[in-house]
Image (cartoon, rainbow, N blue to C red):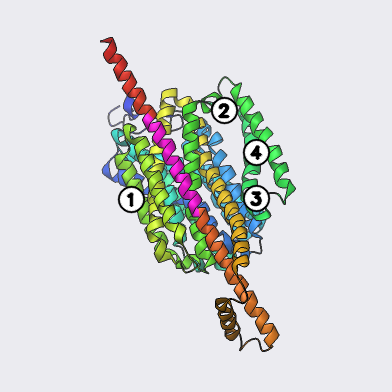
Amino acid sequence: MSGSVLPYRFQPEERPVFPGAPYAPRQTTLNRCLYALSALVMAMTAGLSNGLVSVNLLWISGNVGLYASEGSLLLAVYVAFNATANLLLVKARTQFGIPATMHTVLVVLIGGQCLQMLWPSFGMEVVAQAVSGIAAGGLTSLTLYNLFQVFPLRYRPMALVIGFGLPPLAIPIARLFPIDIIALNDWYGLHVIVATMGLAALTMLVLMPLPPTERAKVFEPLDAATVGLTIPAMLLICTVLAEGRFLWWTDAPWLGWALAIALPLLGLALLIEARRARPLLWVRWFATVDILRFALIALVFRVALAEQTYSAIGLLTLGGLTSDQLHTLFLFVLFAMVAGTIAAAVLAKPERFTELMLVAALVIALGAWLDTASTSETRPTQLLLSQSLLGFGAALFLGPALLDGLRRVTLKGPTHLVSFVVLFSTTQNVGGLIGVAFLGTLQTARARLHAEAIAESVSLGDPGVISRLAQNAEGIARVVIDPAHRQGEANALLGSALQDQANVLAFNDSCWAVTWIALATTLLLLSTLVNSRFRLFAGARHLRGNE
Protein backbone atom coordinates (compact mmCIF):
# COMPACT_ATOMS: atom_id res chain seq x y z
CA MET A 1 0.00 0.00 0.00
CA SER A 2 3.05 2.30 -0.07
CA GLY A 3 2.54 5.46 -2.10
CA SER A 4 -1.25 5.34 -1.73
CA VAL A 5 -3.05 8.54 -0.74
CA LEU A 6 -5.34 8.25 2.23
CA PRO A 7 -8.73 9.96 1.83
CA TYR A 8 -9.16 13.17 3.77
CA ARG A 9 -10.96 12.67 7.06
CA PHE A 10 -13.23 15.53 7.97
CA GLN A 11 -13.05 16.77 11.54
CA PRO A 12 -16.26 17.17 13.60
CA GLU A 13 -16.03 20.98 13.44
CA GLU A 14 -15.82 20.78 9.63
CA ARG A 15 -19.18 19.09 9.27
CA PRO A 16 -21.96 21.09 7.57
CA VAL A 17 -24.17 23.10 9.91
CA PHE A 18 -27.30 22.71 7.78
CA PRO A 19 -28.58 20.01 5.39
CA GLY A 20 -27.35 20.49 1.84
CA ALA A 21 -24.32 22.56 2.85
CA PRO A 22 -20.80 21.30 2.08
CA TYR A 23 -18.10 20.36 4.55
CA ALA A 24 -15.66 23.17 5.39
CA PRO A 25 -12.15 21.66 5.62
CA ARG A 26 -8.98 23.67 6.08
CA GLN A 27 -7.97 25.34 2.80
CA THR A 28 -4.70 26.70 1.43
CA THR A 29 -4.33 30.44 0.91
CA LEU A 30 -4.57 30.00 -2.87
CA ASN A 31 -7.76 27.98 -2.56
CA ARG A 32 -9.26 30.60 -0.25
CA CYS A 33 -8.60 33.28 -2.87
CA LEU A 34 -10.11 31.15 -5.63
CA TYR A 35 -13.19 30.35 -3.54
CA ALA A 36 -13.58 34.08 -2.81
CA LEU A 37 -13.47 34.78 -6.56
CA SER A 38 -16.00 32.00 -7.13
CA ALA A 39 -18.31 33.52 -4.50
CA LEU A 40 -18.12 36.90 -6.25
CA VAL A 41 -18.95 35.34 -9.63
CA MET A 42 -21.91 33.42 -8.15
CA ALA A 43 -23.24 36.55 -6.43
CA MET A 44 -22.99 38.74 -9.53
CA THR A 45 -24.64 36.07 -11.68
CA ALA A 46 -27.49 35.81 -9.17
CA GLY A 47 -28.00 39.57 -9.02
CA LEU A 48 -27.42 40.61 -12.62
CA SER A 49 -29.75 37.98 -14.10
CA ASN A 50 -32.68 40.07 -12.88
CA GLY A 51 -30.95 43.36 -12.12
CA LEU A 52 -30.25 44.16 -15.77
CA VAL A 53 -33.92 43.54 -16.60
CA SER A 54 -35.44 45.40 -13.64
CA VAL A 55 -33.36 48.58 -13.95
CA ASN A 56 -33.97 48.82 -17.71
CA LEU A 57 -37.56 47.56 -17.77
CA LEU A 58 -39.00 50.86 -19.00
CA TRP A 59 -36.71 50.95 -22.04
CA ILE A 60 -37.00 47.21 -22.67
CA SER A 61 -40.80 47.41 -22.74
CA GLY A 62 -40.85 50.33 -25.15
CA ASN A 63 -38.20 48.87 -27.41
CA VAL A 64 -39.95 45.54 -27.94
CA GLY A 65 -43.45 47.02 -28.12
CA LEU A 66 -44.78 45.99 -24.70
CA TYR A 67 -47.12 47.95 -22.48
CA ALA A 68 -45.74 48.86 -19.06
CA SER A 69 -48.11 46.34 -17.47
CA GLU A 70 -46.79 43.56 -19.73
CA GLY A 71 -43.20 44.47 -18.95
CA SER A 72 -43.85 44.41 -15.20
CA LEU A 73 -45.06 40.82 -15.57
CA LEU A 74 -41.41 39.84 -16.09
CA LEU A 75 -40.57 41.05 -12.58
CA ALA A 76 -43.59 39.24 -11.13
CA VAL A 77 -42.49 35.93 -12.66
CA TYR A 78 -38.92 36.35 -11.42
CA VAL A 79 -40.00 37.21 -7.86
CA ALA A 80 -42.51 34.35 -7.66
CA PHE A 81 -40.00 31.70 -8.72
CA ASN A 82 -37.16 33.19 -6.67
CA ALA A 83 -39.28 33.30 -3.51
CA THR A 84 -40.29 29.65 -3.88
CA ALA A 85 -37.08 28.23 -5.38
CA ASN A 86 -35.68 27.02 -2.08
CA LEU A 87 -38.72 24.83 -1.48
CA LEU A 88 -36.98 22.47 -3.87
CA LEU A 89 -33.33 23.52 -3.99
CA VAL A 90 -32.42 22.87 -0.34
CA LYS A 91 -33.72 19.30 -0.49
CA ALA A 92 -32.33 18.79 -4.00
CA ARG A 93 -28.82 19.67 -2.81
CA THR A 94 -29.23 17.25 0.10
CA GLN A 95 -30.53 14.35 -2.00
CA PHE A 96 -28.61 14.78 -5.27
CA GLY A 97 -25.60 16.80 -4.14
CA ILE A 98 -24.49 20.34 -4.94
CA PRO A 99 -22.76 19.61 -8.30
CA ALA A 100 -25.67 17.74 -9.88
CA THR A 101 -28.25 20.27 -8.68
CA MET A 102 -26.40 23.46 -9.57
CA HIS A 103 -24.93 22.17 -12.83
CA THR A 104 -28.49 21.46 -13.96
CA VAL A 105 -29.75 24.87 -12.83
CA LEU A 106 -26.91 26.77 -14.51
CA VAL A 107 -27.19 24.82 -17.77
CA VAL A 108 -30.92 25.60 -17.88
CA LEU A 109 -30.17 29.29 -17.11
CA ILE A 110 -27.66 29.51 -19.96
CA GLY A 111 -30.00 27.58 -22.26
CA GLY A 112 -32.90 29.92 -21.50
CA GLN A 113 -30.82 32.98 -22.41
CA CYS A 114 -29.59 31.32 -25.61
CA LEU A 115 -33.13 30.41 -26.67
CA GLN A 116 -34.22 34.01 -26.10
CA MET A 117 -31.37 35.18 -28.34
CA LEU A 118 -32.25 32.67 -31.07
CA TRP A 119 -36.05 33.06 -30.97
CA PRO A 120 -36.79 36.33 -29.17
CA SER A 121 -40.37 36.63 -27.92
CA PHE A 122 -42.28 37.78 -24.87
CA GLY A 123 -43.20 34.21 -23.95
CA MET A 124 -39.57 33.08 -24.11
CA GLU A 125 -38.57 36.08 -21.98
CA VAL A 126 -41.09 35.04 -19.33
CA VAL A 127 -39.59 31.54 -19.28
CA ALA A 128 -36.07 32.99 -19.06
CA GLN A 129 -37.10 35.14 -16.09
CA ALA A 130 -38.63 32.15 -14.31
CA VAL A 131 -35.41 30.18 -14.75
CA SER A 132 -33.39 33.21 -13.59
CA GLY A 133 -35.47 33.38 -10.42
CA ILE A 134 -34.78 29.73 -9.60
CA ALA A 135 -31.10 30.05 -10.49
CA ALA A 136 -30.67 33.16 -8.33
CA GLY A 137 -31.97 31.27 -5.31
CA GLY A 138 -29.41 28.52 -5.83
CA LEU A 139 -26.56 30.89 -6.67
CA THR A 140 -27.07 32.88 -3.48
CA SER A 141 -26.58 29.66 -1.52
CA LEU A 142 -23.48 28.86 -3.59
CA THR A 143 -22.10 32.28 -2.71
CA LEU A 144 -22.41 31.37 0.97
CA TYR A 145 -20.93 27.91 0.51
CA ASN A 146 -17.88 29.31 -1.28
CA LEU A 147 -17.36 31.89 1.46
CA PHE A 148 -17.57 29.12 4.06
CA GLN A 149 -14.36 27.77 2.47
CA VAL A 150 -12.73 31.21 2.75
CA PHE A 151 -13.46 32.09 6.38
CA PRO A 152 -12.47 29.98 9.41
CA LEU A 153 -15.28 28.60 11.54
CA ARG A 154 -15.11 31.40 14.11
CA TYR A 155 -15.81 33.94 11.34
CA ARG A 156 -18.78 32.02 9.92
CA PRO A 157 -21.28 34.83 10.84
CA MET A 158 -19.12 37.27 8.87
CA ALA A 159 -19.26 34.93 5.87
CA LEU A 160 -23.06 34.82 6.12
CA VAL A 161 -23.35 38.63 6.20
CA ILE A 162 -21.02 39.08 3.23
CA GLY A 163 -22.60 36.19 1.34
CA PHE A 164 -26.08 37.69 1.51
CA GLY A 165 -24.71 41.21 1.04
CA LEU A 166 -22.98 40.51 -2.28
CA PRO A 167 -25.98 39.74 -4.60
CA PRO A 168 -27.79 43.06 -3.87
CA LEU A 169 -24.66 44.90 -5.08
CA ALA A 170 -25.60 43.76 -8.58
CA ILE A 171 -28.48 46.28 -8.68
CA PRO A 172 -26.31 49.44 -8.61
CA ILE A 173 -23.76 47.63 -10.78
CA ALA A 174 -26.52 46.96 -13.35
CA ARG A 175 -27.18 50.71 -13.41
CA LEU A 176 -23.56 51.25 -14.49
CA PHE A 177 -23.91 49.24 -17.73
CA PRO A 178 -24.32 51.57 -20.75
CA ILE A 179 -27.74 51.16 -22.35
CA ASP A 180 -26.13 50.99 -25.80
CA ILE A 181 -24.40 47.74 -24.84
CA ILE A 182 -27.27 45.89 -23.22
CA ALA A 183 -29.86 47.18 -25.73
CA LEU A 184 -27.82 45.99 -28.71
CA ASN A 185 -30.00 44.25 -31.33
CA ASP A 186 -33.29 44.23 -29.42
CA TRP A 187 -31.59 43.62 -26.05
CA TYR A 188 -29.42 40.85 -27.45
CA GLY A 189 -26.58 42.33 -25.41
CA LEU A 190 -28.48 41.81 -22.15
CA HIS A 191 -28.92 38.10 -22.78
CA VAL A 192 -25.29 37.74 -23.86
CA ILE A 193 -24.18 39.26 -20.53
CA VAL A 194 -26.45 36.99 -18.45
CA ALA A 195 -25.49 33.87 -20.43
CA THR A 196 -21.80 34.77 -20.09
CA MET A 197 -22.16 35.23 -16.34
CA GLY A 198 -23.95 31.88 -16.12
CA LEU A 199 -21.14 30.24 -18.08
CA ALA A 200 -18.56 31.87 -15.78
CA ALA A 201 -20.42 30.55 -12.71
CA LEU A 202 -20.56 27.05 -14.20
CA THR A 203 -16.84 27.22 -15.02
CA MET A 204 -15.95 28.25 -11.46
CA LEU A 205 -18.13 25.47 -10.07
CA VAL A 206 -16.28 22.92 -12.21
CA LEU A 207 -12.77 24.31 -11.61
CA MET A 208 -13.29 24.92 -7.87
CA PRO A 209 -15.70 22.19 -6.78
CA LEU A 210 -17.07 22.48 -3.29
CA PRO A 211 -16.36 19.74 -0.73
CA PRO A 212 -19.02 17.03 -0.52
CA THR A 213 -22.16 17.34 1.51
CA GLU A 214 -23.98 14.79 3.61
CA ARG A 215 -26.50 13.29 1.23
CA ALA A 216 -29.75 11.64 2.18
CA LYS A 217 -33.08 10.78 0.61
CA VAL A 218 -35.26 13.66 1.77
CA PHE A 219 -37.93 14.23 -0.89
CA GLU A 220 -41.42 13.02 0.01
CA PRO A 221 -44.54 12.66 -2.19
CA LEU A 222 -46.37 15.47 -0.36
CA ASP A 223 -43.56 17.88 -1.27
CA ALA A 224 -44.93 17.89 -4.82
CA ALA A 225 -48.38 18.89 -3.56
CA THR A 226 -46.99 21.78 -1.51
CA VAL A 227 -44.80 23.06 -4.32
CA GLY A 228 -47.58 22.56 -6.88
CA LEU A 229 -49.92 24.74 -4.81
CA THR A 230 -47.42 27.35 -3.65
CA ILE A 231 -45.86 28.31 -6.99
CA PRO A 232 -49.14 29.19 -8.79
CA ALA A 233 -50.35 30.99 -5.66
CA MET A 234 -47.19 33.12 -5.55
CA LEU A 235 -47.38 33.72 -9.31
CA LEU A 236 -50.91 35.07 -8.97
CA ILE A 237 -50.09 37.21 -5.93
CA CYS A 238 -46.97 38.67 -7.54
CA THR A 239 -48.84 39.34 -10.78
CA VAL A 240 -51.52 41.27 -8.91
CA LEU A 241 -48.89 43.32 -7.08
CA ALA A 242 -46.99 44.08 -10.29
CA GLU A 243 -50.04 44.90 -12.44
CA GLY A 244 -52.32 46.67 -9.97
CA ARG A 245 -50.83 50.16 -10.19
CA PHE A 246 -50.76 50.07 -14.00
CA LEU A 247 -54.23 48.66 -14.68
CA TRP A 248 -55.53 50.28 -11.46
CA TRP A 249 -56.83 48.13 -8.68
CA THR A 250 -60.56 48.76 -9.11
CA ASP A 251 -60.58 48.93 -12.91
CA ALA A 252 -59.45 45.34 -13.63
CA PRO A 253 -61.82 42.75 -12.08
CA TRP A 254 -59.46 39.90 -12.92
CA LEU A 255 -57.03 41.18 -10.26
CA GLY A 256 -59.61 40.35 -7.61
CA TRP A 257 -60.30 36.95 -9.15
CA ALA A 258 -56.57 36.21 -9.18
CA LEU A 259 -56.34 36.92 -5.46
CA ALA A 260 -59.50 34.91 -4.84
CA ILE A 261 -57.78 31.90 -6.43
CA ALA A 262 -54.31 32.50 -4.96
CA LEU A 263 -55.27 32.76 -1.30
CA PRO A 264 -57.11 29.40 -1.11
CA LEU A 265 -54.22 27.72 -2.96
CA LEU A 266 -51.74 29.13 -0.47
CA GLY A 267 -54.02 28.31 2.44
CA LEU A 268 -54.37 24.70 1.27
CA ALA A 269 -50.58 24.37 0.96
CA LEU A 270 -50.12 25.67 4.51
CA LEU A 271 -52.86 23.34 5.77
CA ILE A 272 -51.08 20.34 4.22
CA GLU A 273 -47.79 21.42 5.79
CA ALA A 274 -49.37 21.97 9.20
CA ARG A 275 -50.54 18.34 9.26
CA ARG A 276 -47.30 16.71 8.05
CA ALA A 277 -44.90 14.90 10.34
CA ARG A 278 -41.86 16.20 8.39
CA PRO A 279 -43.07 19.35 6.64
CA LEU A 280 -41.26 21.59 4.21
CA LEU A 281 -42.73 24.60 6.00
CA TRP A 282 -43.17 24.62 9.77
CA VAL A 283 -46.42 26.57 9.82
CA ARG A 284 -46.79 26.57 13.61
CA TRP A 285 -43.30 28.05 13.91
CA PHE A 286 -44.36 30.81 11.51
CA ALA A 287 -47.23 31.62 13.88
CA THR A 288 -45.01 32.25 16.92
CA VAL A 289 -44.73 35.84 18.14
CA ASP A 290 -40.97 36.09 17.59
CA ILE A 291 -41.12 34.86 14.00
CA LEU A 292 -44.14 37.02 13.17
CA ARG A 293 -42.30 40.06 14.55
CA PHE A 294 -39.17 39.13 12.61
CA ALA A 295 -41.13 38.68 9.36
CA LEU A 296 -43.01 41.96 9.87
CA ILE A 297 -39.81 43.94 10.46
CA ALA A 298 -38.07 42.35 7.45
CA LEU A 299 -41.11 42.95 5.23
CA VAL A 300 -41.68 46.57 6.30
CA PHE A 301 -38.00 47.32 5.88
CA ARG A 302 -38.03 45.98 2.33
CA VAL A 303 -41.11 48.05 1.56
CA ALA A 304 -39.27 51.16 2.76
CA LEU A 305 -36.32 50.41 0.48
CA ALA A 306 -38.61 50.78 -2.54
CA GLU A 307 -37.99 54.53 -2.19
CA GLN A 308 -34.72 54.07 -4.04
CA THR A 309 -36.04 51.81 -6.79
CA TYR A 310 -39.30 53.71 -7.35
CA SER A 311 -39.46 57.25 -5.93
CA ALA A 312 -35.93 58.50 -6.63
CA ILE A 313 -35.69 56.84 -10.04
CA GLY A 314 -39.22 57.93 -10.93
CA LEU A 315 -38.41 61.53 -10.05
CA LEU A 316 -35.26 61.56 -12.18
CA THR A 317 -37.00 59.78 -15.07
CA LEU A 318 -39.73 62.43 -14.92
CA GLY A 319 -36.96 64.97 -15.48
CA GLY A 320 -35.98 63.20 -18.70
CA LEU A 321 -32.89 61.38 -17.41
CA THR A 322 -31.88 57.87 -18.50
CA SER A 323 -29.72 55.23 -16.80
CA ASP A 324 -26.62 56.50 -18.59
CA GLN A 325 -26.98 59.80 -16.71
CA LEU A 326 -27.23 58.09 -13.32
CA HIS A 327 -23.85 56.34 -13.29
CA THR A 328 -22.24 58.68 -10.73
CA LEU A 329 -25.26 58.42 -8.42
CA PHE A 330 -25.24 54.63 -8.39
CA LEU A 331 -21.47 54.46 -8.07
CA PHE A 332 -21.96 56.31 -4.77
CA VAL A 333 -24.79 53.93 -3.85
CA LEU A 334 -22.54 50.95 -4.63
CA PHE A 335 -19.75 52.25 -2.39
CA ALA A 336 -22.29 52.95 0.37
CA MET A 337 -23.70 49.42 0.14
CA VAL A 338 -20.19 47.95 0.31
CA ALA A 339 -19.50 50.08 3.39
CA GLY A 340 -22.78 48.96 4.96
CA THR A 341 -22.00 45.30 4.30
CA ILE A 342 -18.52 45.64 5.83
CA ALA A 343 -19.94 47.47 8.86
CA ALA A 344 -22.56 44.77 9.36
CA ALA A 345 -19.99 41.98 8.98
CA VAL A 346 -17.66 43.55 11.55
CA LEU A 347 -20.26 44.74 14.07
CA ALA A 348 -22.92 42.02 13.91
CA LYS A 349 -22.92 40.16 17.21
CA PRO A 350 -25.94 38.44 18.82
CA GLU A 351 -26.24 41.17 21.45
CA ARG A 352 -26.15 43.89 18.75
CA PHE A 353 -28.57 42.55 16.14
CA THR A 354 -31.52 44.71 17.19
CA GLU A 355 -29.36 47.80 17.76
CA LEU A 356 -27.85 47.56 14.27
CA MET A 357 -31.27 47.12 12.65
CA LEU A 358 -32.51 50.13 14.65
CA VAL A 359 -29.61 52.26 13.39
CA ALA A 360 -30.29 51.07 9.83
CA ALA A 361 -33.94 52.11 10.14
CA LEU A 362 -32.93 55.59 11.32
CA VAL A 363 -30.43 55.93 8.46
CA ILE A 364 -33.12 55.01 5.93
CA ALA A 365 -35.58 57.43 7.55
CA LEU A 366 -32.99 60.21 7.23
CA GLY A 367 -32.24 59.36 3.60
CA ALA A 368 -35.92 59.31 2.64
CA TRP A 369 -36.57 62.57 4.53
CA LEU A 370 -33.80 64.33 2.59
CA ASP A 371 -35.68 63.49 -0.63
CA THR A 372 -38.97 65.04 0.53
CA ALA A 373 -37.91 68.50 -0.68
CA SER A 374 -37.20 67.49 -4.28
CA THR A 375 -38.27 69.72 -7.17
CA SER A 376 -38.54 69.39 -10.93
CA GLU A 377 -34.98 70.76 -11.08
CA THR A 378 -33.56 68.00 -8.85
CA ARG A 379 -30.67 66.15 -10.48
CA PRO A 380 -28.59 63.09 -9.48
CA THR A 381 -25.86 65.15 -7.77
CA GLN A 382 -28.46 66.45 -5.32
CA LEU A 383 -29.46 62.90 -4.37
CA LEU A 384 -25.96 61.55 -3.73
CA LEU A 385 -26.21 61.83 0.06
CA SER A 386 -29.80 60.61 0.45
CA GLN A 387 -29.43 57.61 -1.86
CA SER A 388 -26.07 56.68 -0.33
CA LEU A 389 -27.73 56.69 3.09
CA LEU A 390 -30.47 54.40 1.77
CA GLY A 391 -27.89 52.03 0.28
CA PHE A 392 -25.85 51.99 3.48
CA GLY A 393 -28.95 51.44 5.63
CA ALA A 394 -30.18 48.59 3.43
CA ALA A 395 -26.85 46.75 3.62
CA LEU A 396 -26.50 47.42 7.35
CA PHE A 397 -29.94 45.93 8.01
CA LEU A 398 -29.66 42.78 5.91
CA GLY A 399 -26.82 41.06 7.77
CA PRO A 400 -28.11 41.42 11.36
CA ALA A 401 -31.65 40.51 10.27
CA LEU A 402 -30.40 37.36 8.58
CA LEU A 403 -28.21 36.32 11.52
CA ASP A 404 -31.04 37.00 13.95
CA GLY A 405 -33.30 34.71 11.93
CA LEU A 406 -30.67 31.98 11.63
CA ARG A 407 -30.11 32.14 15.38
CA ARG A 408 -33.78 31.26 15.80
CA VAL A 409 -33.39 28.41 13.29
CA THR A 410 -30.41 27.04 15.22
CA LEU A 411 -32.51 26.90 18.37
CA LYS A 412 -35.09 24.77 16.55
CA GLY A 413 -32.70 22.60 14.56
CA PRO A 414 -31.78 22.15 10.87
CA THR A 415 -35.27 20.90 9.97
CA HIS A 416 -36.47 24.53 10.08
CA LEU A 417 -33.91 25.79 7.55
CA VAL A 418 -36.17 25.54 4.49
CA SER A 419 -38.93 27.36 6.38
CA PHE A 420 -36.63 30.22 7.32
CA VAL A 421 -35.04 30.56 3.88
CA VAL A 422 -38.46 30.65 2.19
CA LEU A 423 -39.79 33.13 4.77
CA PHE A 424 -36.82 35.49 4.49
CA SER A 425 -36.74 35.24 0.70
CA THR A 426 -40.46 36.00 0.54
CA THR A 427 -40.19 39.07 2.77
CA GLN A 428 -37.36 40.46 0.66
CA ASN A 429 -38.65 39.59 -2.82
CA VAL A 430 -42.39 39.99 -2.41
CA GLY A 431 -41.72 42.89 -0.03
CA GLY A 432 -40.00 44.70 -2.87
CA LEU A 433 -43.06 44.24 -5.09
CA ILE A 434 -45.35 45.38 -2.27
CA GLY A 435 -43.17 48.45 -1.76
CA VAL A 436 -43.26 49.49 -5.41
CA ALA A 437 -47.01 48.75 -5.63
CA PHE A 438 -47.69 50.80 -2.49
CA LEU A 439 -45.53 53.78 -3.46
CA GLY A 440 -46.75 53.67 -7.07
CA THR A 441 -50.38 53.66 -5.96
CA LEU A 442 -49.75 56.44 -3.45
CA GLN A 443 -47.89 58.54 -6.02
CA THR A 444 -50.65 58.15 -8.61
CA ALA A 445 -53.42 59.04 -6.15
CA ARG A 446 -51.53 62.01 -4.69
CA ALA A 447 -50.60 63.28 -8.17
CA ARG A 448 -54.31 63.49 -9.03
CA LEU A 449 -55.04 65.43 -5.86
CA HIS A 450 -52.11 67.79 -6.39
CA ALA A 451 -53.12 68.34 -10.03
CA GLU A 452 -56.64 69.29 -8.95
CA ALA A 453 -55.31 71.65 -6.27
CA ILE A 454 -52.87 73.30 -8.69
CA ALA A 455 -55.56 73.68 -11.37
CA GLU A 456 -57.86 75.38 -8.87
CA SER A 457 -55.11 77.79 -7.83
CA VAL A 458 -54.18 78.80 -11.38
CA SER A 459 -55.98 81.78 -12.89
CA LEU A 460 -55.61 82.70 -16.53
CA GLY A 461 -55.69 86.33 -15.43
CA ASP A 462 -52.69 85.93 -13.15
CA PRO A 463 -49.68 87.93 -14.47
CA GLY A 464 -47.32 85.01 -13.87
CA VAL A 465 -49.56 82.65 -15.84
CA ILE A 466 -49.93 85.19 -18.66
CA SER A 467 -46.15 85.59 -18.79
CA ARG A 468 -45.60 81.80 -18.87
CA LEU A 469 -48.15 81.39 -21.70
CA ALA A 470 -46.44 84.15 -23.65
CA GLN A 471 -43.06 82.46 -23.20
CA ASN A 472 -44.51 79.14 -24.36
CA ALA A 473 -46.09 80.76 -27.42
CA GLU A 474 -42.86 82.56 -28.27
CA GLY A 475 -40.90 79.35 -27.96
CA ILE A 476 -43.00 77.55 -30.60
CA ALA A 477 -43.62 80.55 -32.87
CA ARG A 478 -41.21 79.30 -35.53
CA VAL A 479 -42.89 75.91 -35.64
CA VAL A 480 -46.58 76.83 -35.24
CA ILE A 481 -47.62 79.73 -37.46
CA ASP A 482 -51.38 79.91 -36.80
CA PRO A 483 -51.96 82.18 -33.73
CA ALA A 484 -54.96 80.21 -32.41
CA HIS A 485 -53.12 76.90 -32.74
CA ARG A 486 -50.04 78.46 -31.16
CA GLN A 487 -52.05 79.63 -28.16
CA GLY A 488 -53.56 76.17 -27.77
CA GLU A 489 -50.10 74.58 -27.81
CA ALA A 490 -48.92 77.14 -25.25
CA ASN A 491 -51.82 76.19 -22.98
CA ALA A 492 -50.98 72.50 -23.43
CA LEU A 493 -47.34 73.14 -22.48
CA LEU A 494 -48.48 74.95 -19.35
CA GLY A 495 -50.80 72.06 -18.48
CA SER A 496 -47.94 69.59 -18.96
CA ALA A 497 -45.68 71.65 -16.69
CA LEU A 498 -48.38 71.78 -14.01
CA GLN A 499 -48.89 68.00 -14.27
CA ASP A 500 -45.13 67.48 -13.90
CA GLN A 501 -45.20 69.64 -10.78
CA ALA A 502 -48.08 67.56 -9.40
CA ASN A 503 -46.06 64.40 -10.01
CA VAL A 504 -43.01 65.86 -8.27
CA LEU A 505 -45.12 66.75 -5.22
CA ALA A 506 -46.56 63.23 -5.26
CA PHE A 507 -43.07 61.70 -5.35
CA ASN A 508 -42.23 63.86 -2.33
CA ASP A 509 -45.30 62.45 -0.60
CA SER A 510 -44.06 58.92 -1.29
CA CYS A 511 -40.73 59.85 0.31
CA TRP A 512 -42.62 61.14 3.35
CA ALA A 513 -44.45 57.81 3.51
CA VAL A 514 -41.14 55.92 3.50
CA THR A 515 -39.81 58.24 6.21
CA TRP A 516 -42.76 57.46 8.47
CA ILE A 517 -42.56 53.73 7.69
CA ALA A 518 -38.87 53.70 8.64
CA LEU A 519 -39.61 55.62 11.85
CA ALA A 520 -42.43 53.20 12.70
CA THR A 521 -39.99 50.33 12.17
CA THR A 522 -37.59 52.10 14.51
CA LEU A 523 -40.26 52.23 17.21
CA LEU A 524 -41.05 48.54 16.70
CA LEU A 525 -37.36 47.64 17.01
CA LEU A 526 -37.02 49.90 20.04
CA SER A 527 -39.94 48.18 21.75
CA THR A 528 -38.35 44.80 20.97
CA LEU A 529 -35.04 45.98 22.42
CA VAL A 530 -36.66 47.36 25.59
CA ASN A 531 -38.67 44.16 26.03
CA SER A 532 -35.59 41.94 25.69
CA ARG A 533 -33.61 44.11 28.12
CA PHE A 534 -36.48 44.05 30.59
CA ARG A 535 -36.64 40.25 30.42
CA LEU A 536 -32.89 40.00 31.00
CA PHE A 537 -33.15 42.37 33.96
CA ALA A 538 -36.10 40.44 35.41
CA GLY A 539 -34.25 37.15 34.97
CA ALA A 540 -31.12 38.48 36.67
CA ARG A 541 -33.19 39.89 39.51
CA HIS A 542 -34.94 36.54 39.95
CA LEU A 543 -31.58 34.74 40.13
CA ARG A 544 -30.29 37.19 42.75
CA GLY A 545 -33.47 36.65 44.76
CA ASN A 546 -32.88 32.88 44.82
CA GLU A 547 -29.32 33.21 46.12
Q: CA distance from mark 1 to mark 3?
A: 36 Å
Q: Looking at the rendered structure, which numbered label has been put on residue 233?
A: 4
Q: Along the horizontal axis of the image, is 44 left or right of 236?
A: left
Quarter of the image that includes the C terminus: top left
At horizontal 39% and vertical 36% (from top left) the residue drawn is 526
Label 3 packing within 10 angstroms: few (<14), some (14-19), many (20+): many
User: Are the residues flagged by discs 1 and 3 in contact, CB closer than 8 Å?
Assistant: no
User: Are the residues flagged by discs 3 and 2 in contact, CB closer than 8 Å?
Assistant: no
Task: Out of 466 and 208, give the one closest to the viewer.
Answer: 466
Residue 7 visible in the picture: no
Identify residue for label 3: 244
Label 1 packing within 10 angstroms: few (<14), some (14-19), many (20+): some
User: Are the residues flagged by discs 1 and 4 in contact, CB closer than 8 Å?
Assistant: no
At horizontal 49% and vertical 27% (from top left) the residue drawn is 289
- Magenta range is 511-530
Q: Secondary structure at mark 2?
A: loop
At horizontal 70% and vertical 84% (from top left) the residue drawn is 484
Magenta stretch: helix, strand or loop mostly: helix
Residue 483, horizontal then vertical, whole percent: 68, 87
Task: Out of 183 and 5, give the one closest to the viewer.
Answer: 183
Q: Is residue 345 magenta?
A: no
